[in-house]
Amino acid sequence: MIANTIERARGRWREILPQFGIDTRFLQNRHGPCPICGGKDRFRFDDRDGSGSYYCNQCGPGPGIMLIRKFKGWSHATASRAGTQGEQDLSSSGRSKEPRVRNVISDATRAVGYFAGAARPQALSIF
């Protein structure tokens, strides 16, 4: 499940990450503020090979799924489950993305309500 989720996300990270609350201003291949630690000029999103890769001089490097994990404080499995659920919701035809995202947020809030510090629930709807 996890490997499939990550493979389906390949090349789509600029679309996926904002669904988790990561602002598009962070998704540029130039130094800027870090969405994880808040550093002013230590983060860049380079998306090598469509992996969603990033590098922060404080937080370290990682692929897109790690960015979600660190940003949300989630485990790998939790982030992957959020992506899998979101993919199913967004693959439905005839609907706009906005209502499906709200539904996923609502469902995810119930599922991960016990995670302390999760400012936003599992909102990714596009894996």
Image: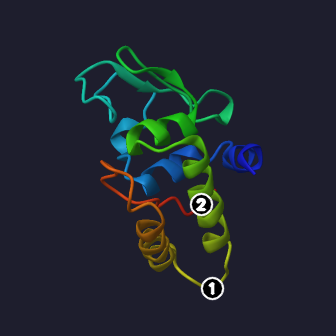
Spot occupied by residue 23 in the image (x, y as percentages of width and height): 35, 47
Given residues 7 and 46, the one toward you in this image is 7
Q: Are marks 1 and 2 in contact (CB under 8 Å)?
A: no
The structure residue drawn at horizontal position 54% and vertical position 26%, both measured from the top left corner, is 62
Of the residues tagged 1 and 2, which is closer to the observer? 2
Quadrant position of the C terminus in the picture: bottom right
Image quadrant in which you'd find residue 91: bottom right
Relative height, residue 73 to residue 16 (above, below): above
68 sits left or right of 91 in the view: left
- Judging by the rendered image, the residue that carries numbered circle 2 is 126
Relative height, residue 63 to residue 3 (above, below): above
Q: Amino acid at mark 2?
A: Ile
Given residues 25 and 118, the one toward you in this image is 118
User: Which label is found at residue 16?
Assistant: none
- Judging by the rendered image, the residue that carries numbered circle 1 is 94
Query: How dense is the environment of label 2, judged by Cα within 10 Å: few (below 14), some, or many (20 and up)?
Result: many
> Which of disc 2 and disc 1 is earlier in sequence?
1
Spatial separation of the CA atoms under disc 1 and disc 2:
15 Å
The structure residue drawn at horizontal position 69% and vertical position 44%, both measured from the top left corner, is 6
